Amino acid sequence: LTKKDMKGKNVLITAGPTIEPIDPVRNITNRSSGKMGYELARSFSYRGANVVLISGPTSVNPPYILKKFISVKTADEMRNAVMKYYQNSDIIIMTAAVSDFKVKNYSDVKIKKDSGEITLQLIKNPDILKELGEVKKESQLLIGFAAETNNLLDYAKKKLIEKNCDIIIANDVSKKDIGFDSDLNETYIINKMGDVTHVEKSTKKDIAFRIIDYISNSGFIKA
Ligand code: C5P
């Protein structure tokens, strides 16, 4: 029987990649599958939480027990959706691989190949997690993800501080069998006191359960 230790908690989760249009037929995106965020959304729901999932385009089906599913494409759309829903949330988890850059001058007609060479100018997207770190209330638990290929723990700790998170969950995306696109993951949970908890290689479903156990036992959230 599933424990209902998240009963009544409002949880906001972002997941998947974002896509940034170049012209009507072309996008910039990344390899995020959305699986980690969807598994968290599913598990939180099973454990009694009211989950709002805000997702970029993925090929996985949203869990049917969500309170609300919001589909977005670009980082700007994801940001606006997060800002609309975060205030009521007890726990906010950003698993989305938000595109760091967007195209500066979107072409509303298809770009032709005649010129032989083109230059795309990119400008920075909003950093949603950082913005939340600046406005969040003391009572809200803010959790970020860090996907890195090297210096995993150092970079993750740096992000935790820069973005004012309570917890950051780090995973190594240089390994072929875990992380992006995979059903498997291996993570390190780092809290703002600097404690590191290793969650050994397992399915994303299992990792989601362990992350929620950690949150449940961490003392970060009040009953
Ligand atoms: O991209 P970066 O490595 O900084 O991502 C770390 C965390 O910040 C992730 O939780 C990601 O979802 C979040 N993020 C965000 N908005 C961005 C970039 C990242 O919310 N524009």
Image: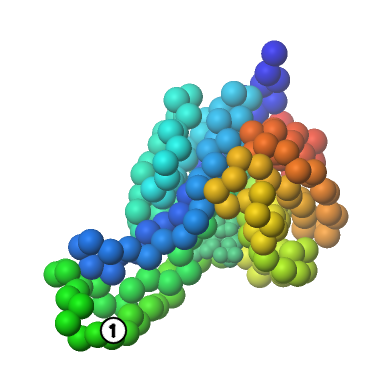
Pick the residue in front: 160 or 152.
Answer: 152
User: Does residue 160 appear in the picture of this structure?
Assistant: no
Q: Is residue 218 above or below residue 30?
A: above
Q: Is mark 1 within 8 Å of ligand 1?
A: no
Amino acid at the residue labelled 1: Ile
- Residue 165 position, x and y percent, is 67, 58
Judge by depth and name the residue closer to the eye, 202 or 142. 202
Residue 4: percent from left, percent from top: 67, 21
Report the residue marked by disc 1: 118
Q: Is residue 147 above or below residue 102?
A: above
Vertically, is 117 above or below 20? below
What is the quadrant of residue 7 in the picture?
Answer: top right
Which quadrant would the C terminus be assigned to in this image? Answer: top right
User: Could you say where residue 182 lies in the image, as x and y percent from the top left?
Assistant: 59, 45
Horizontal and vertical percent position of residue 45: 56, 28
Q: Secondary structure at mark 1?
A: loop
Residue at 33% over, 74% down? 103
Q: Residue at x 85, y 55 (%)?
A: 195
Image side of residue 135 versus residue 217, left or right: left
| Residue at the left extreme of this rendering | 109
Q: Is residue 71 visible?
A: yes
From the viewer's side, name the closer residue of 182 and 193: 182
**Where in the image, quadrant-wise, is ligand 1 located?**
bottom right
Lateral position of residue 24 relative to residue 14, left or right: left
Mark 1 residue crowding within 10 angstroms, few (<14) / some (14–19) / many (20+): few
Quadrant including the N terminus: top right
Residue 75, picture quadrant: bottom left
Residue drawn where x is 67% and y is 37% of the image: 203
Picture residue at 75% right of the left edge, 69% below the top? 151
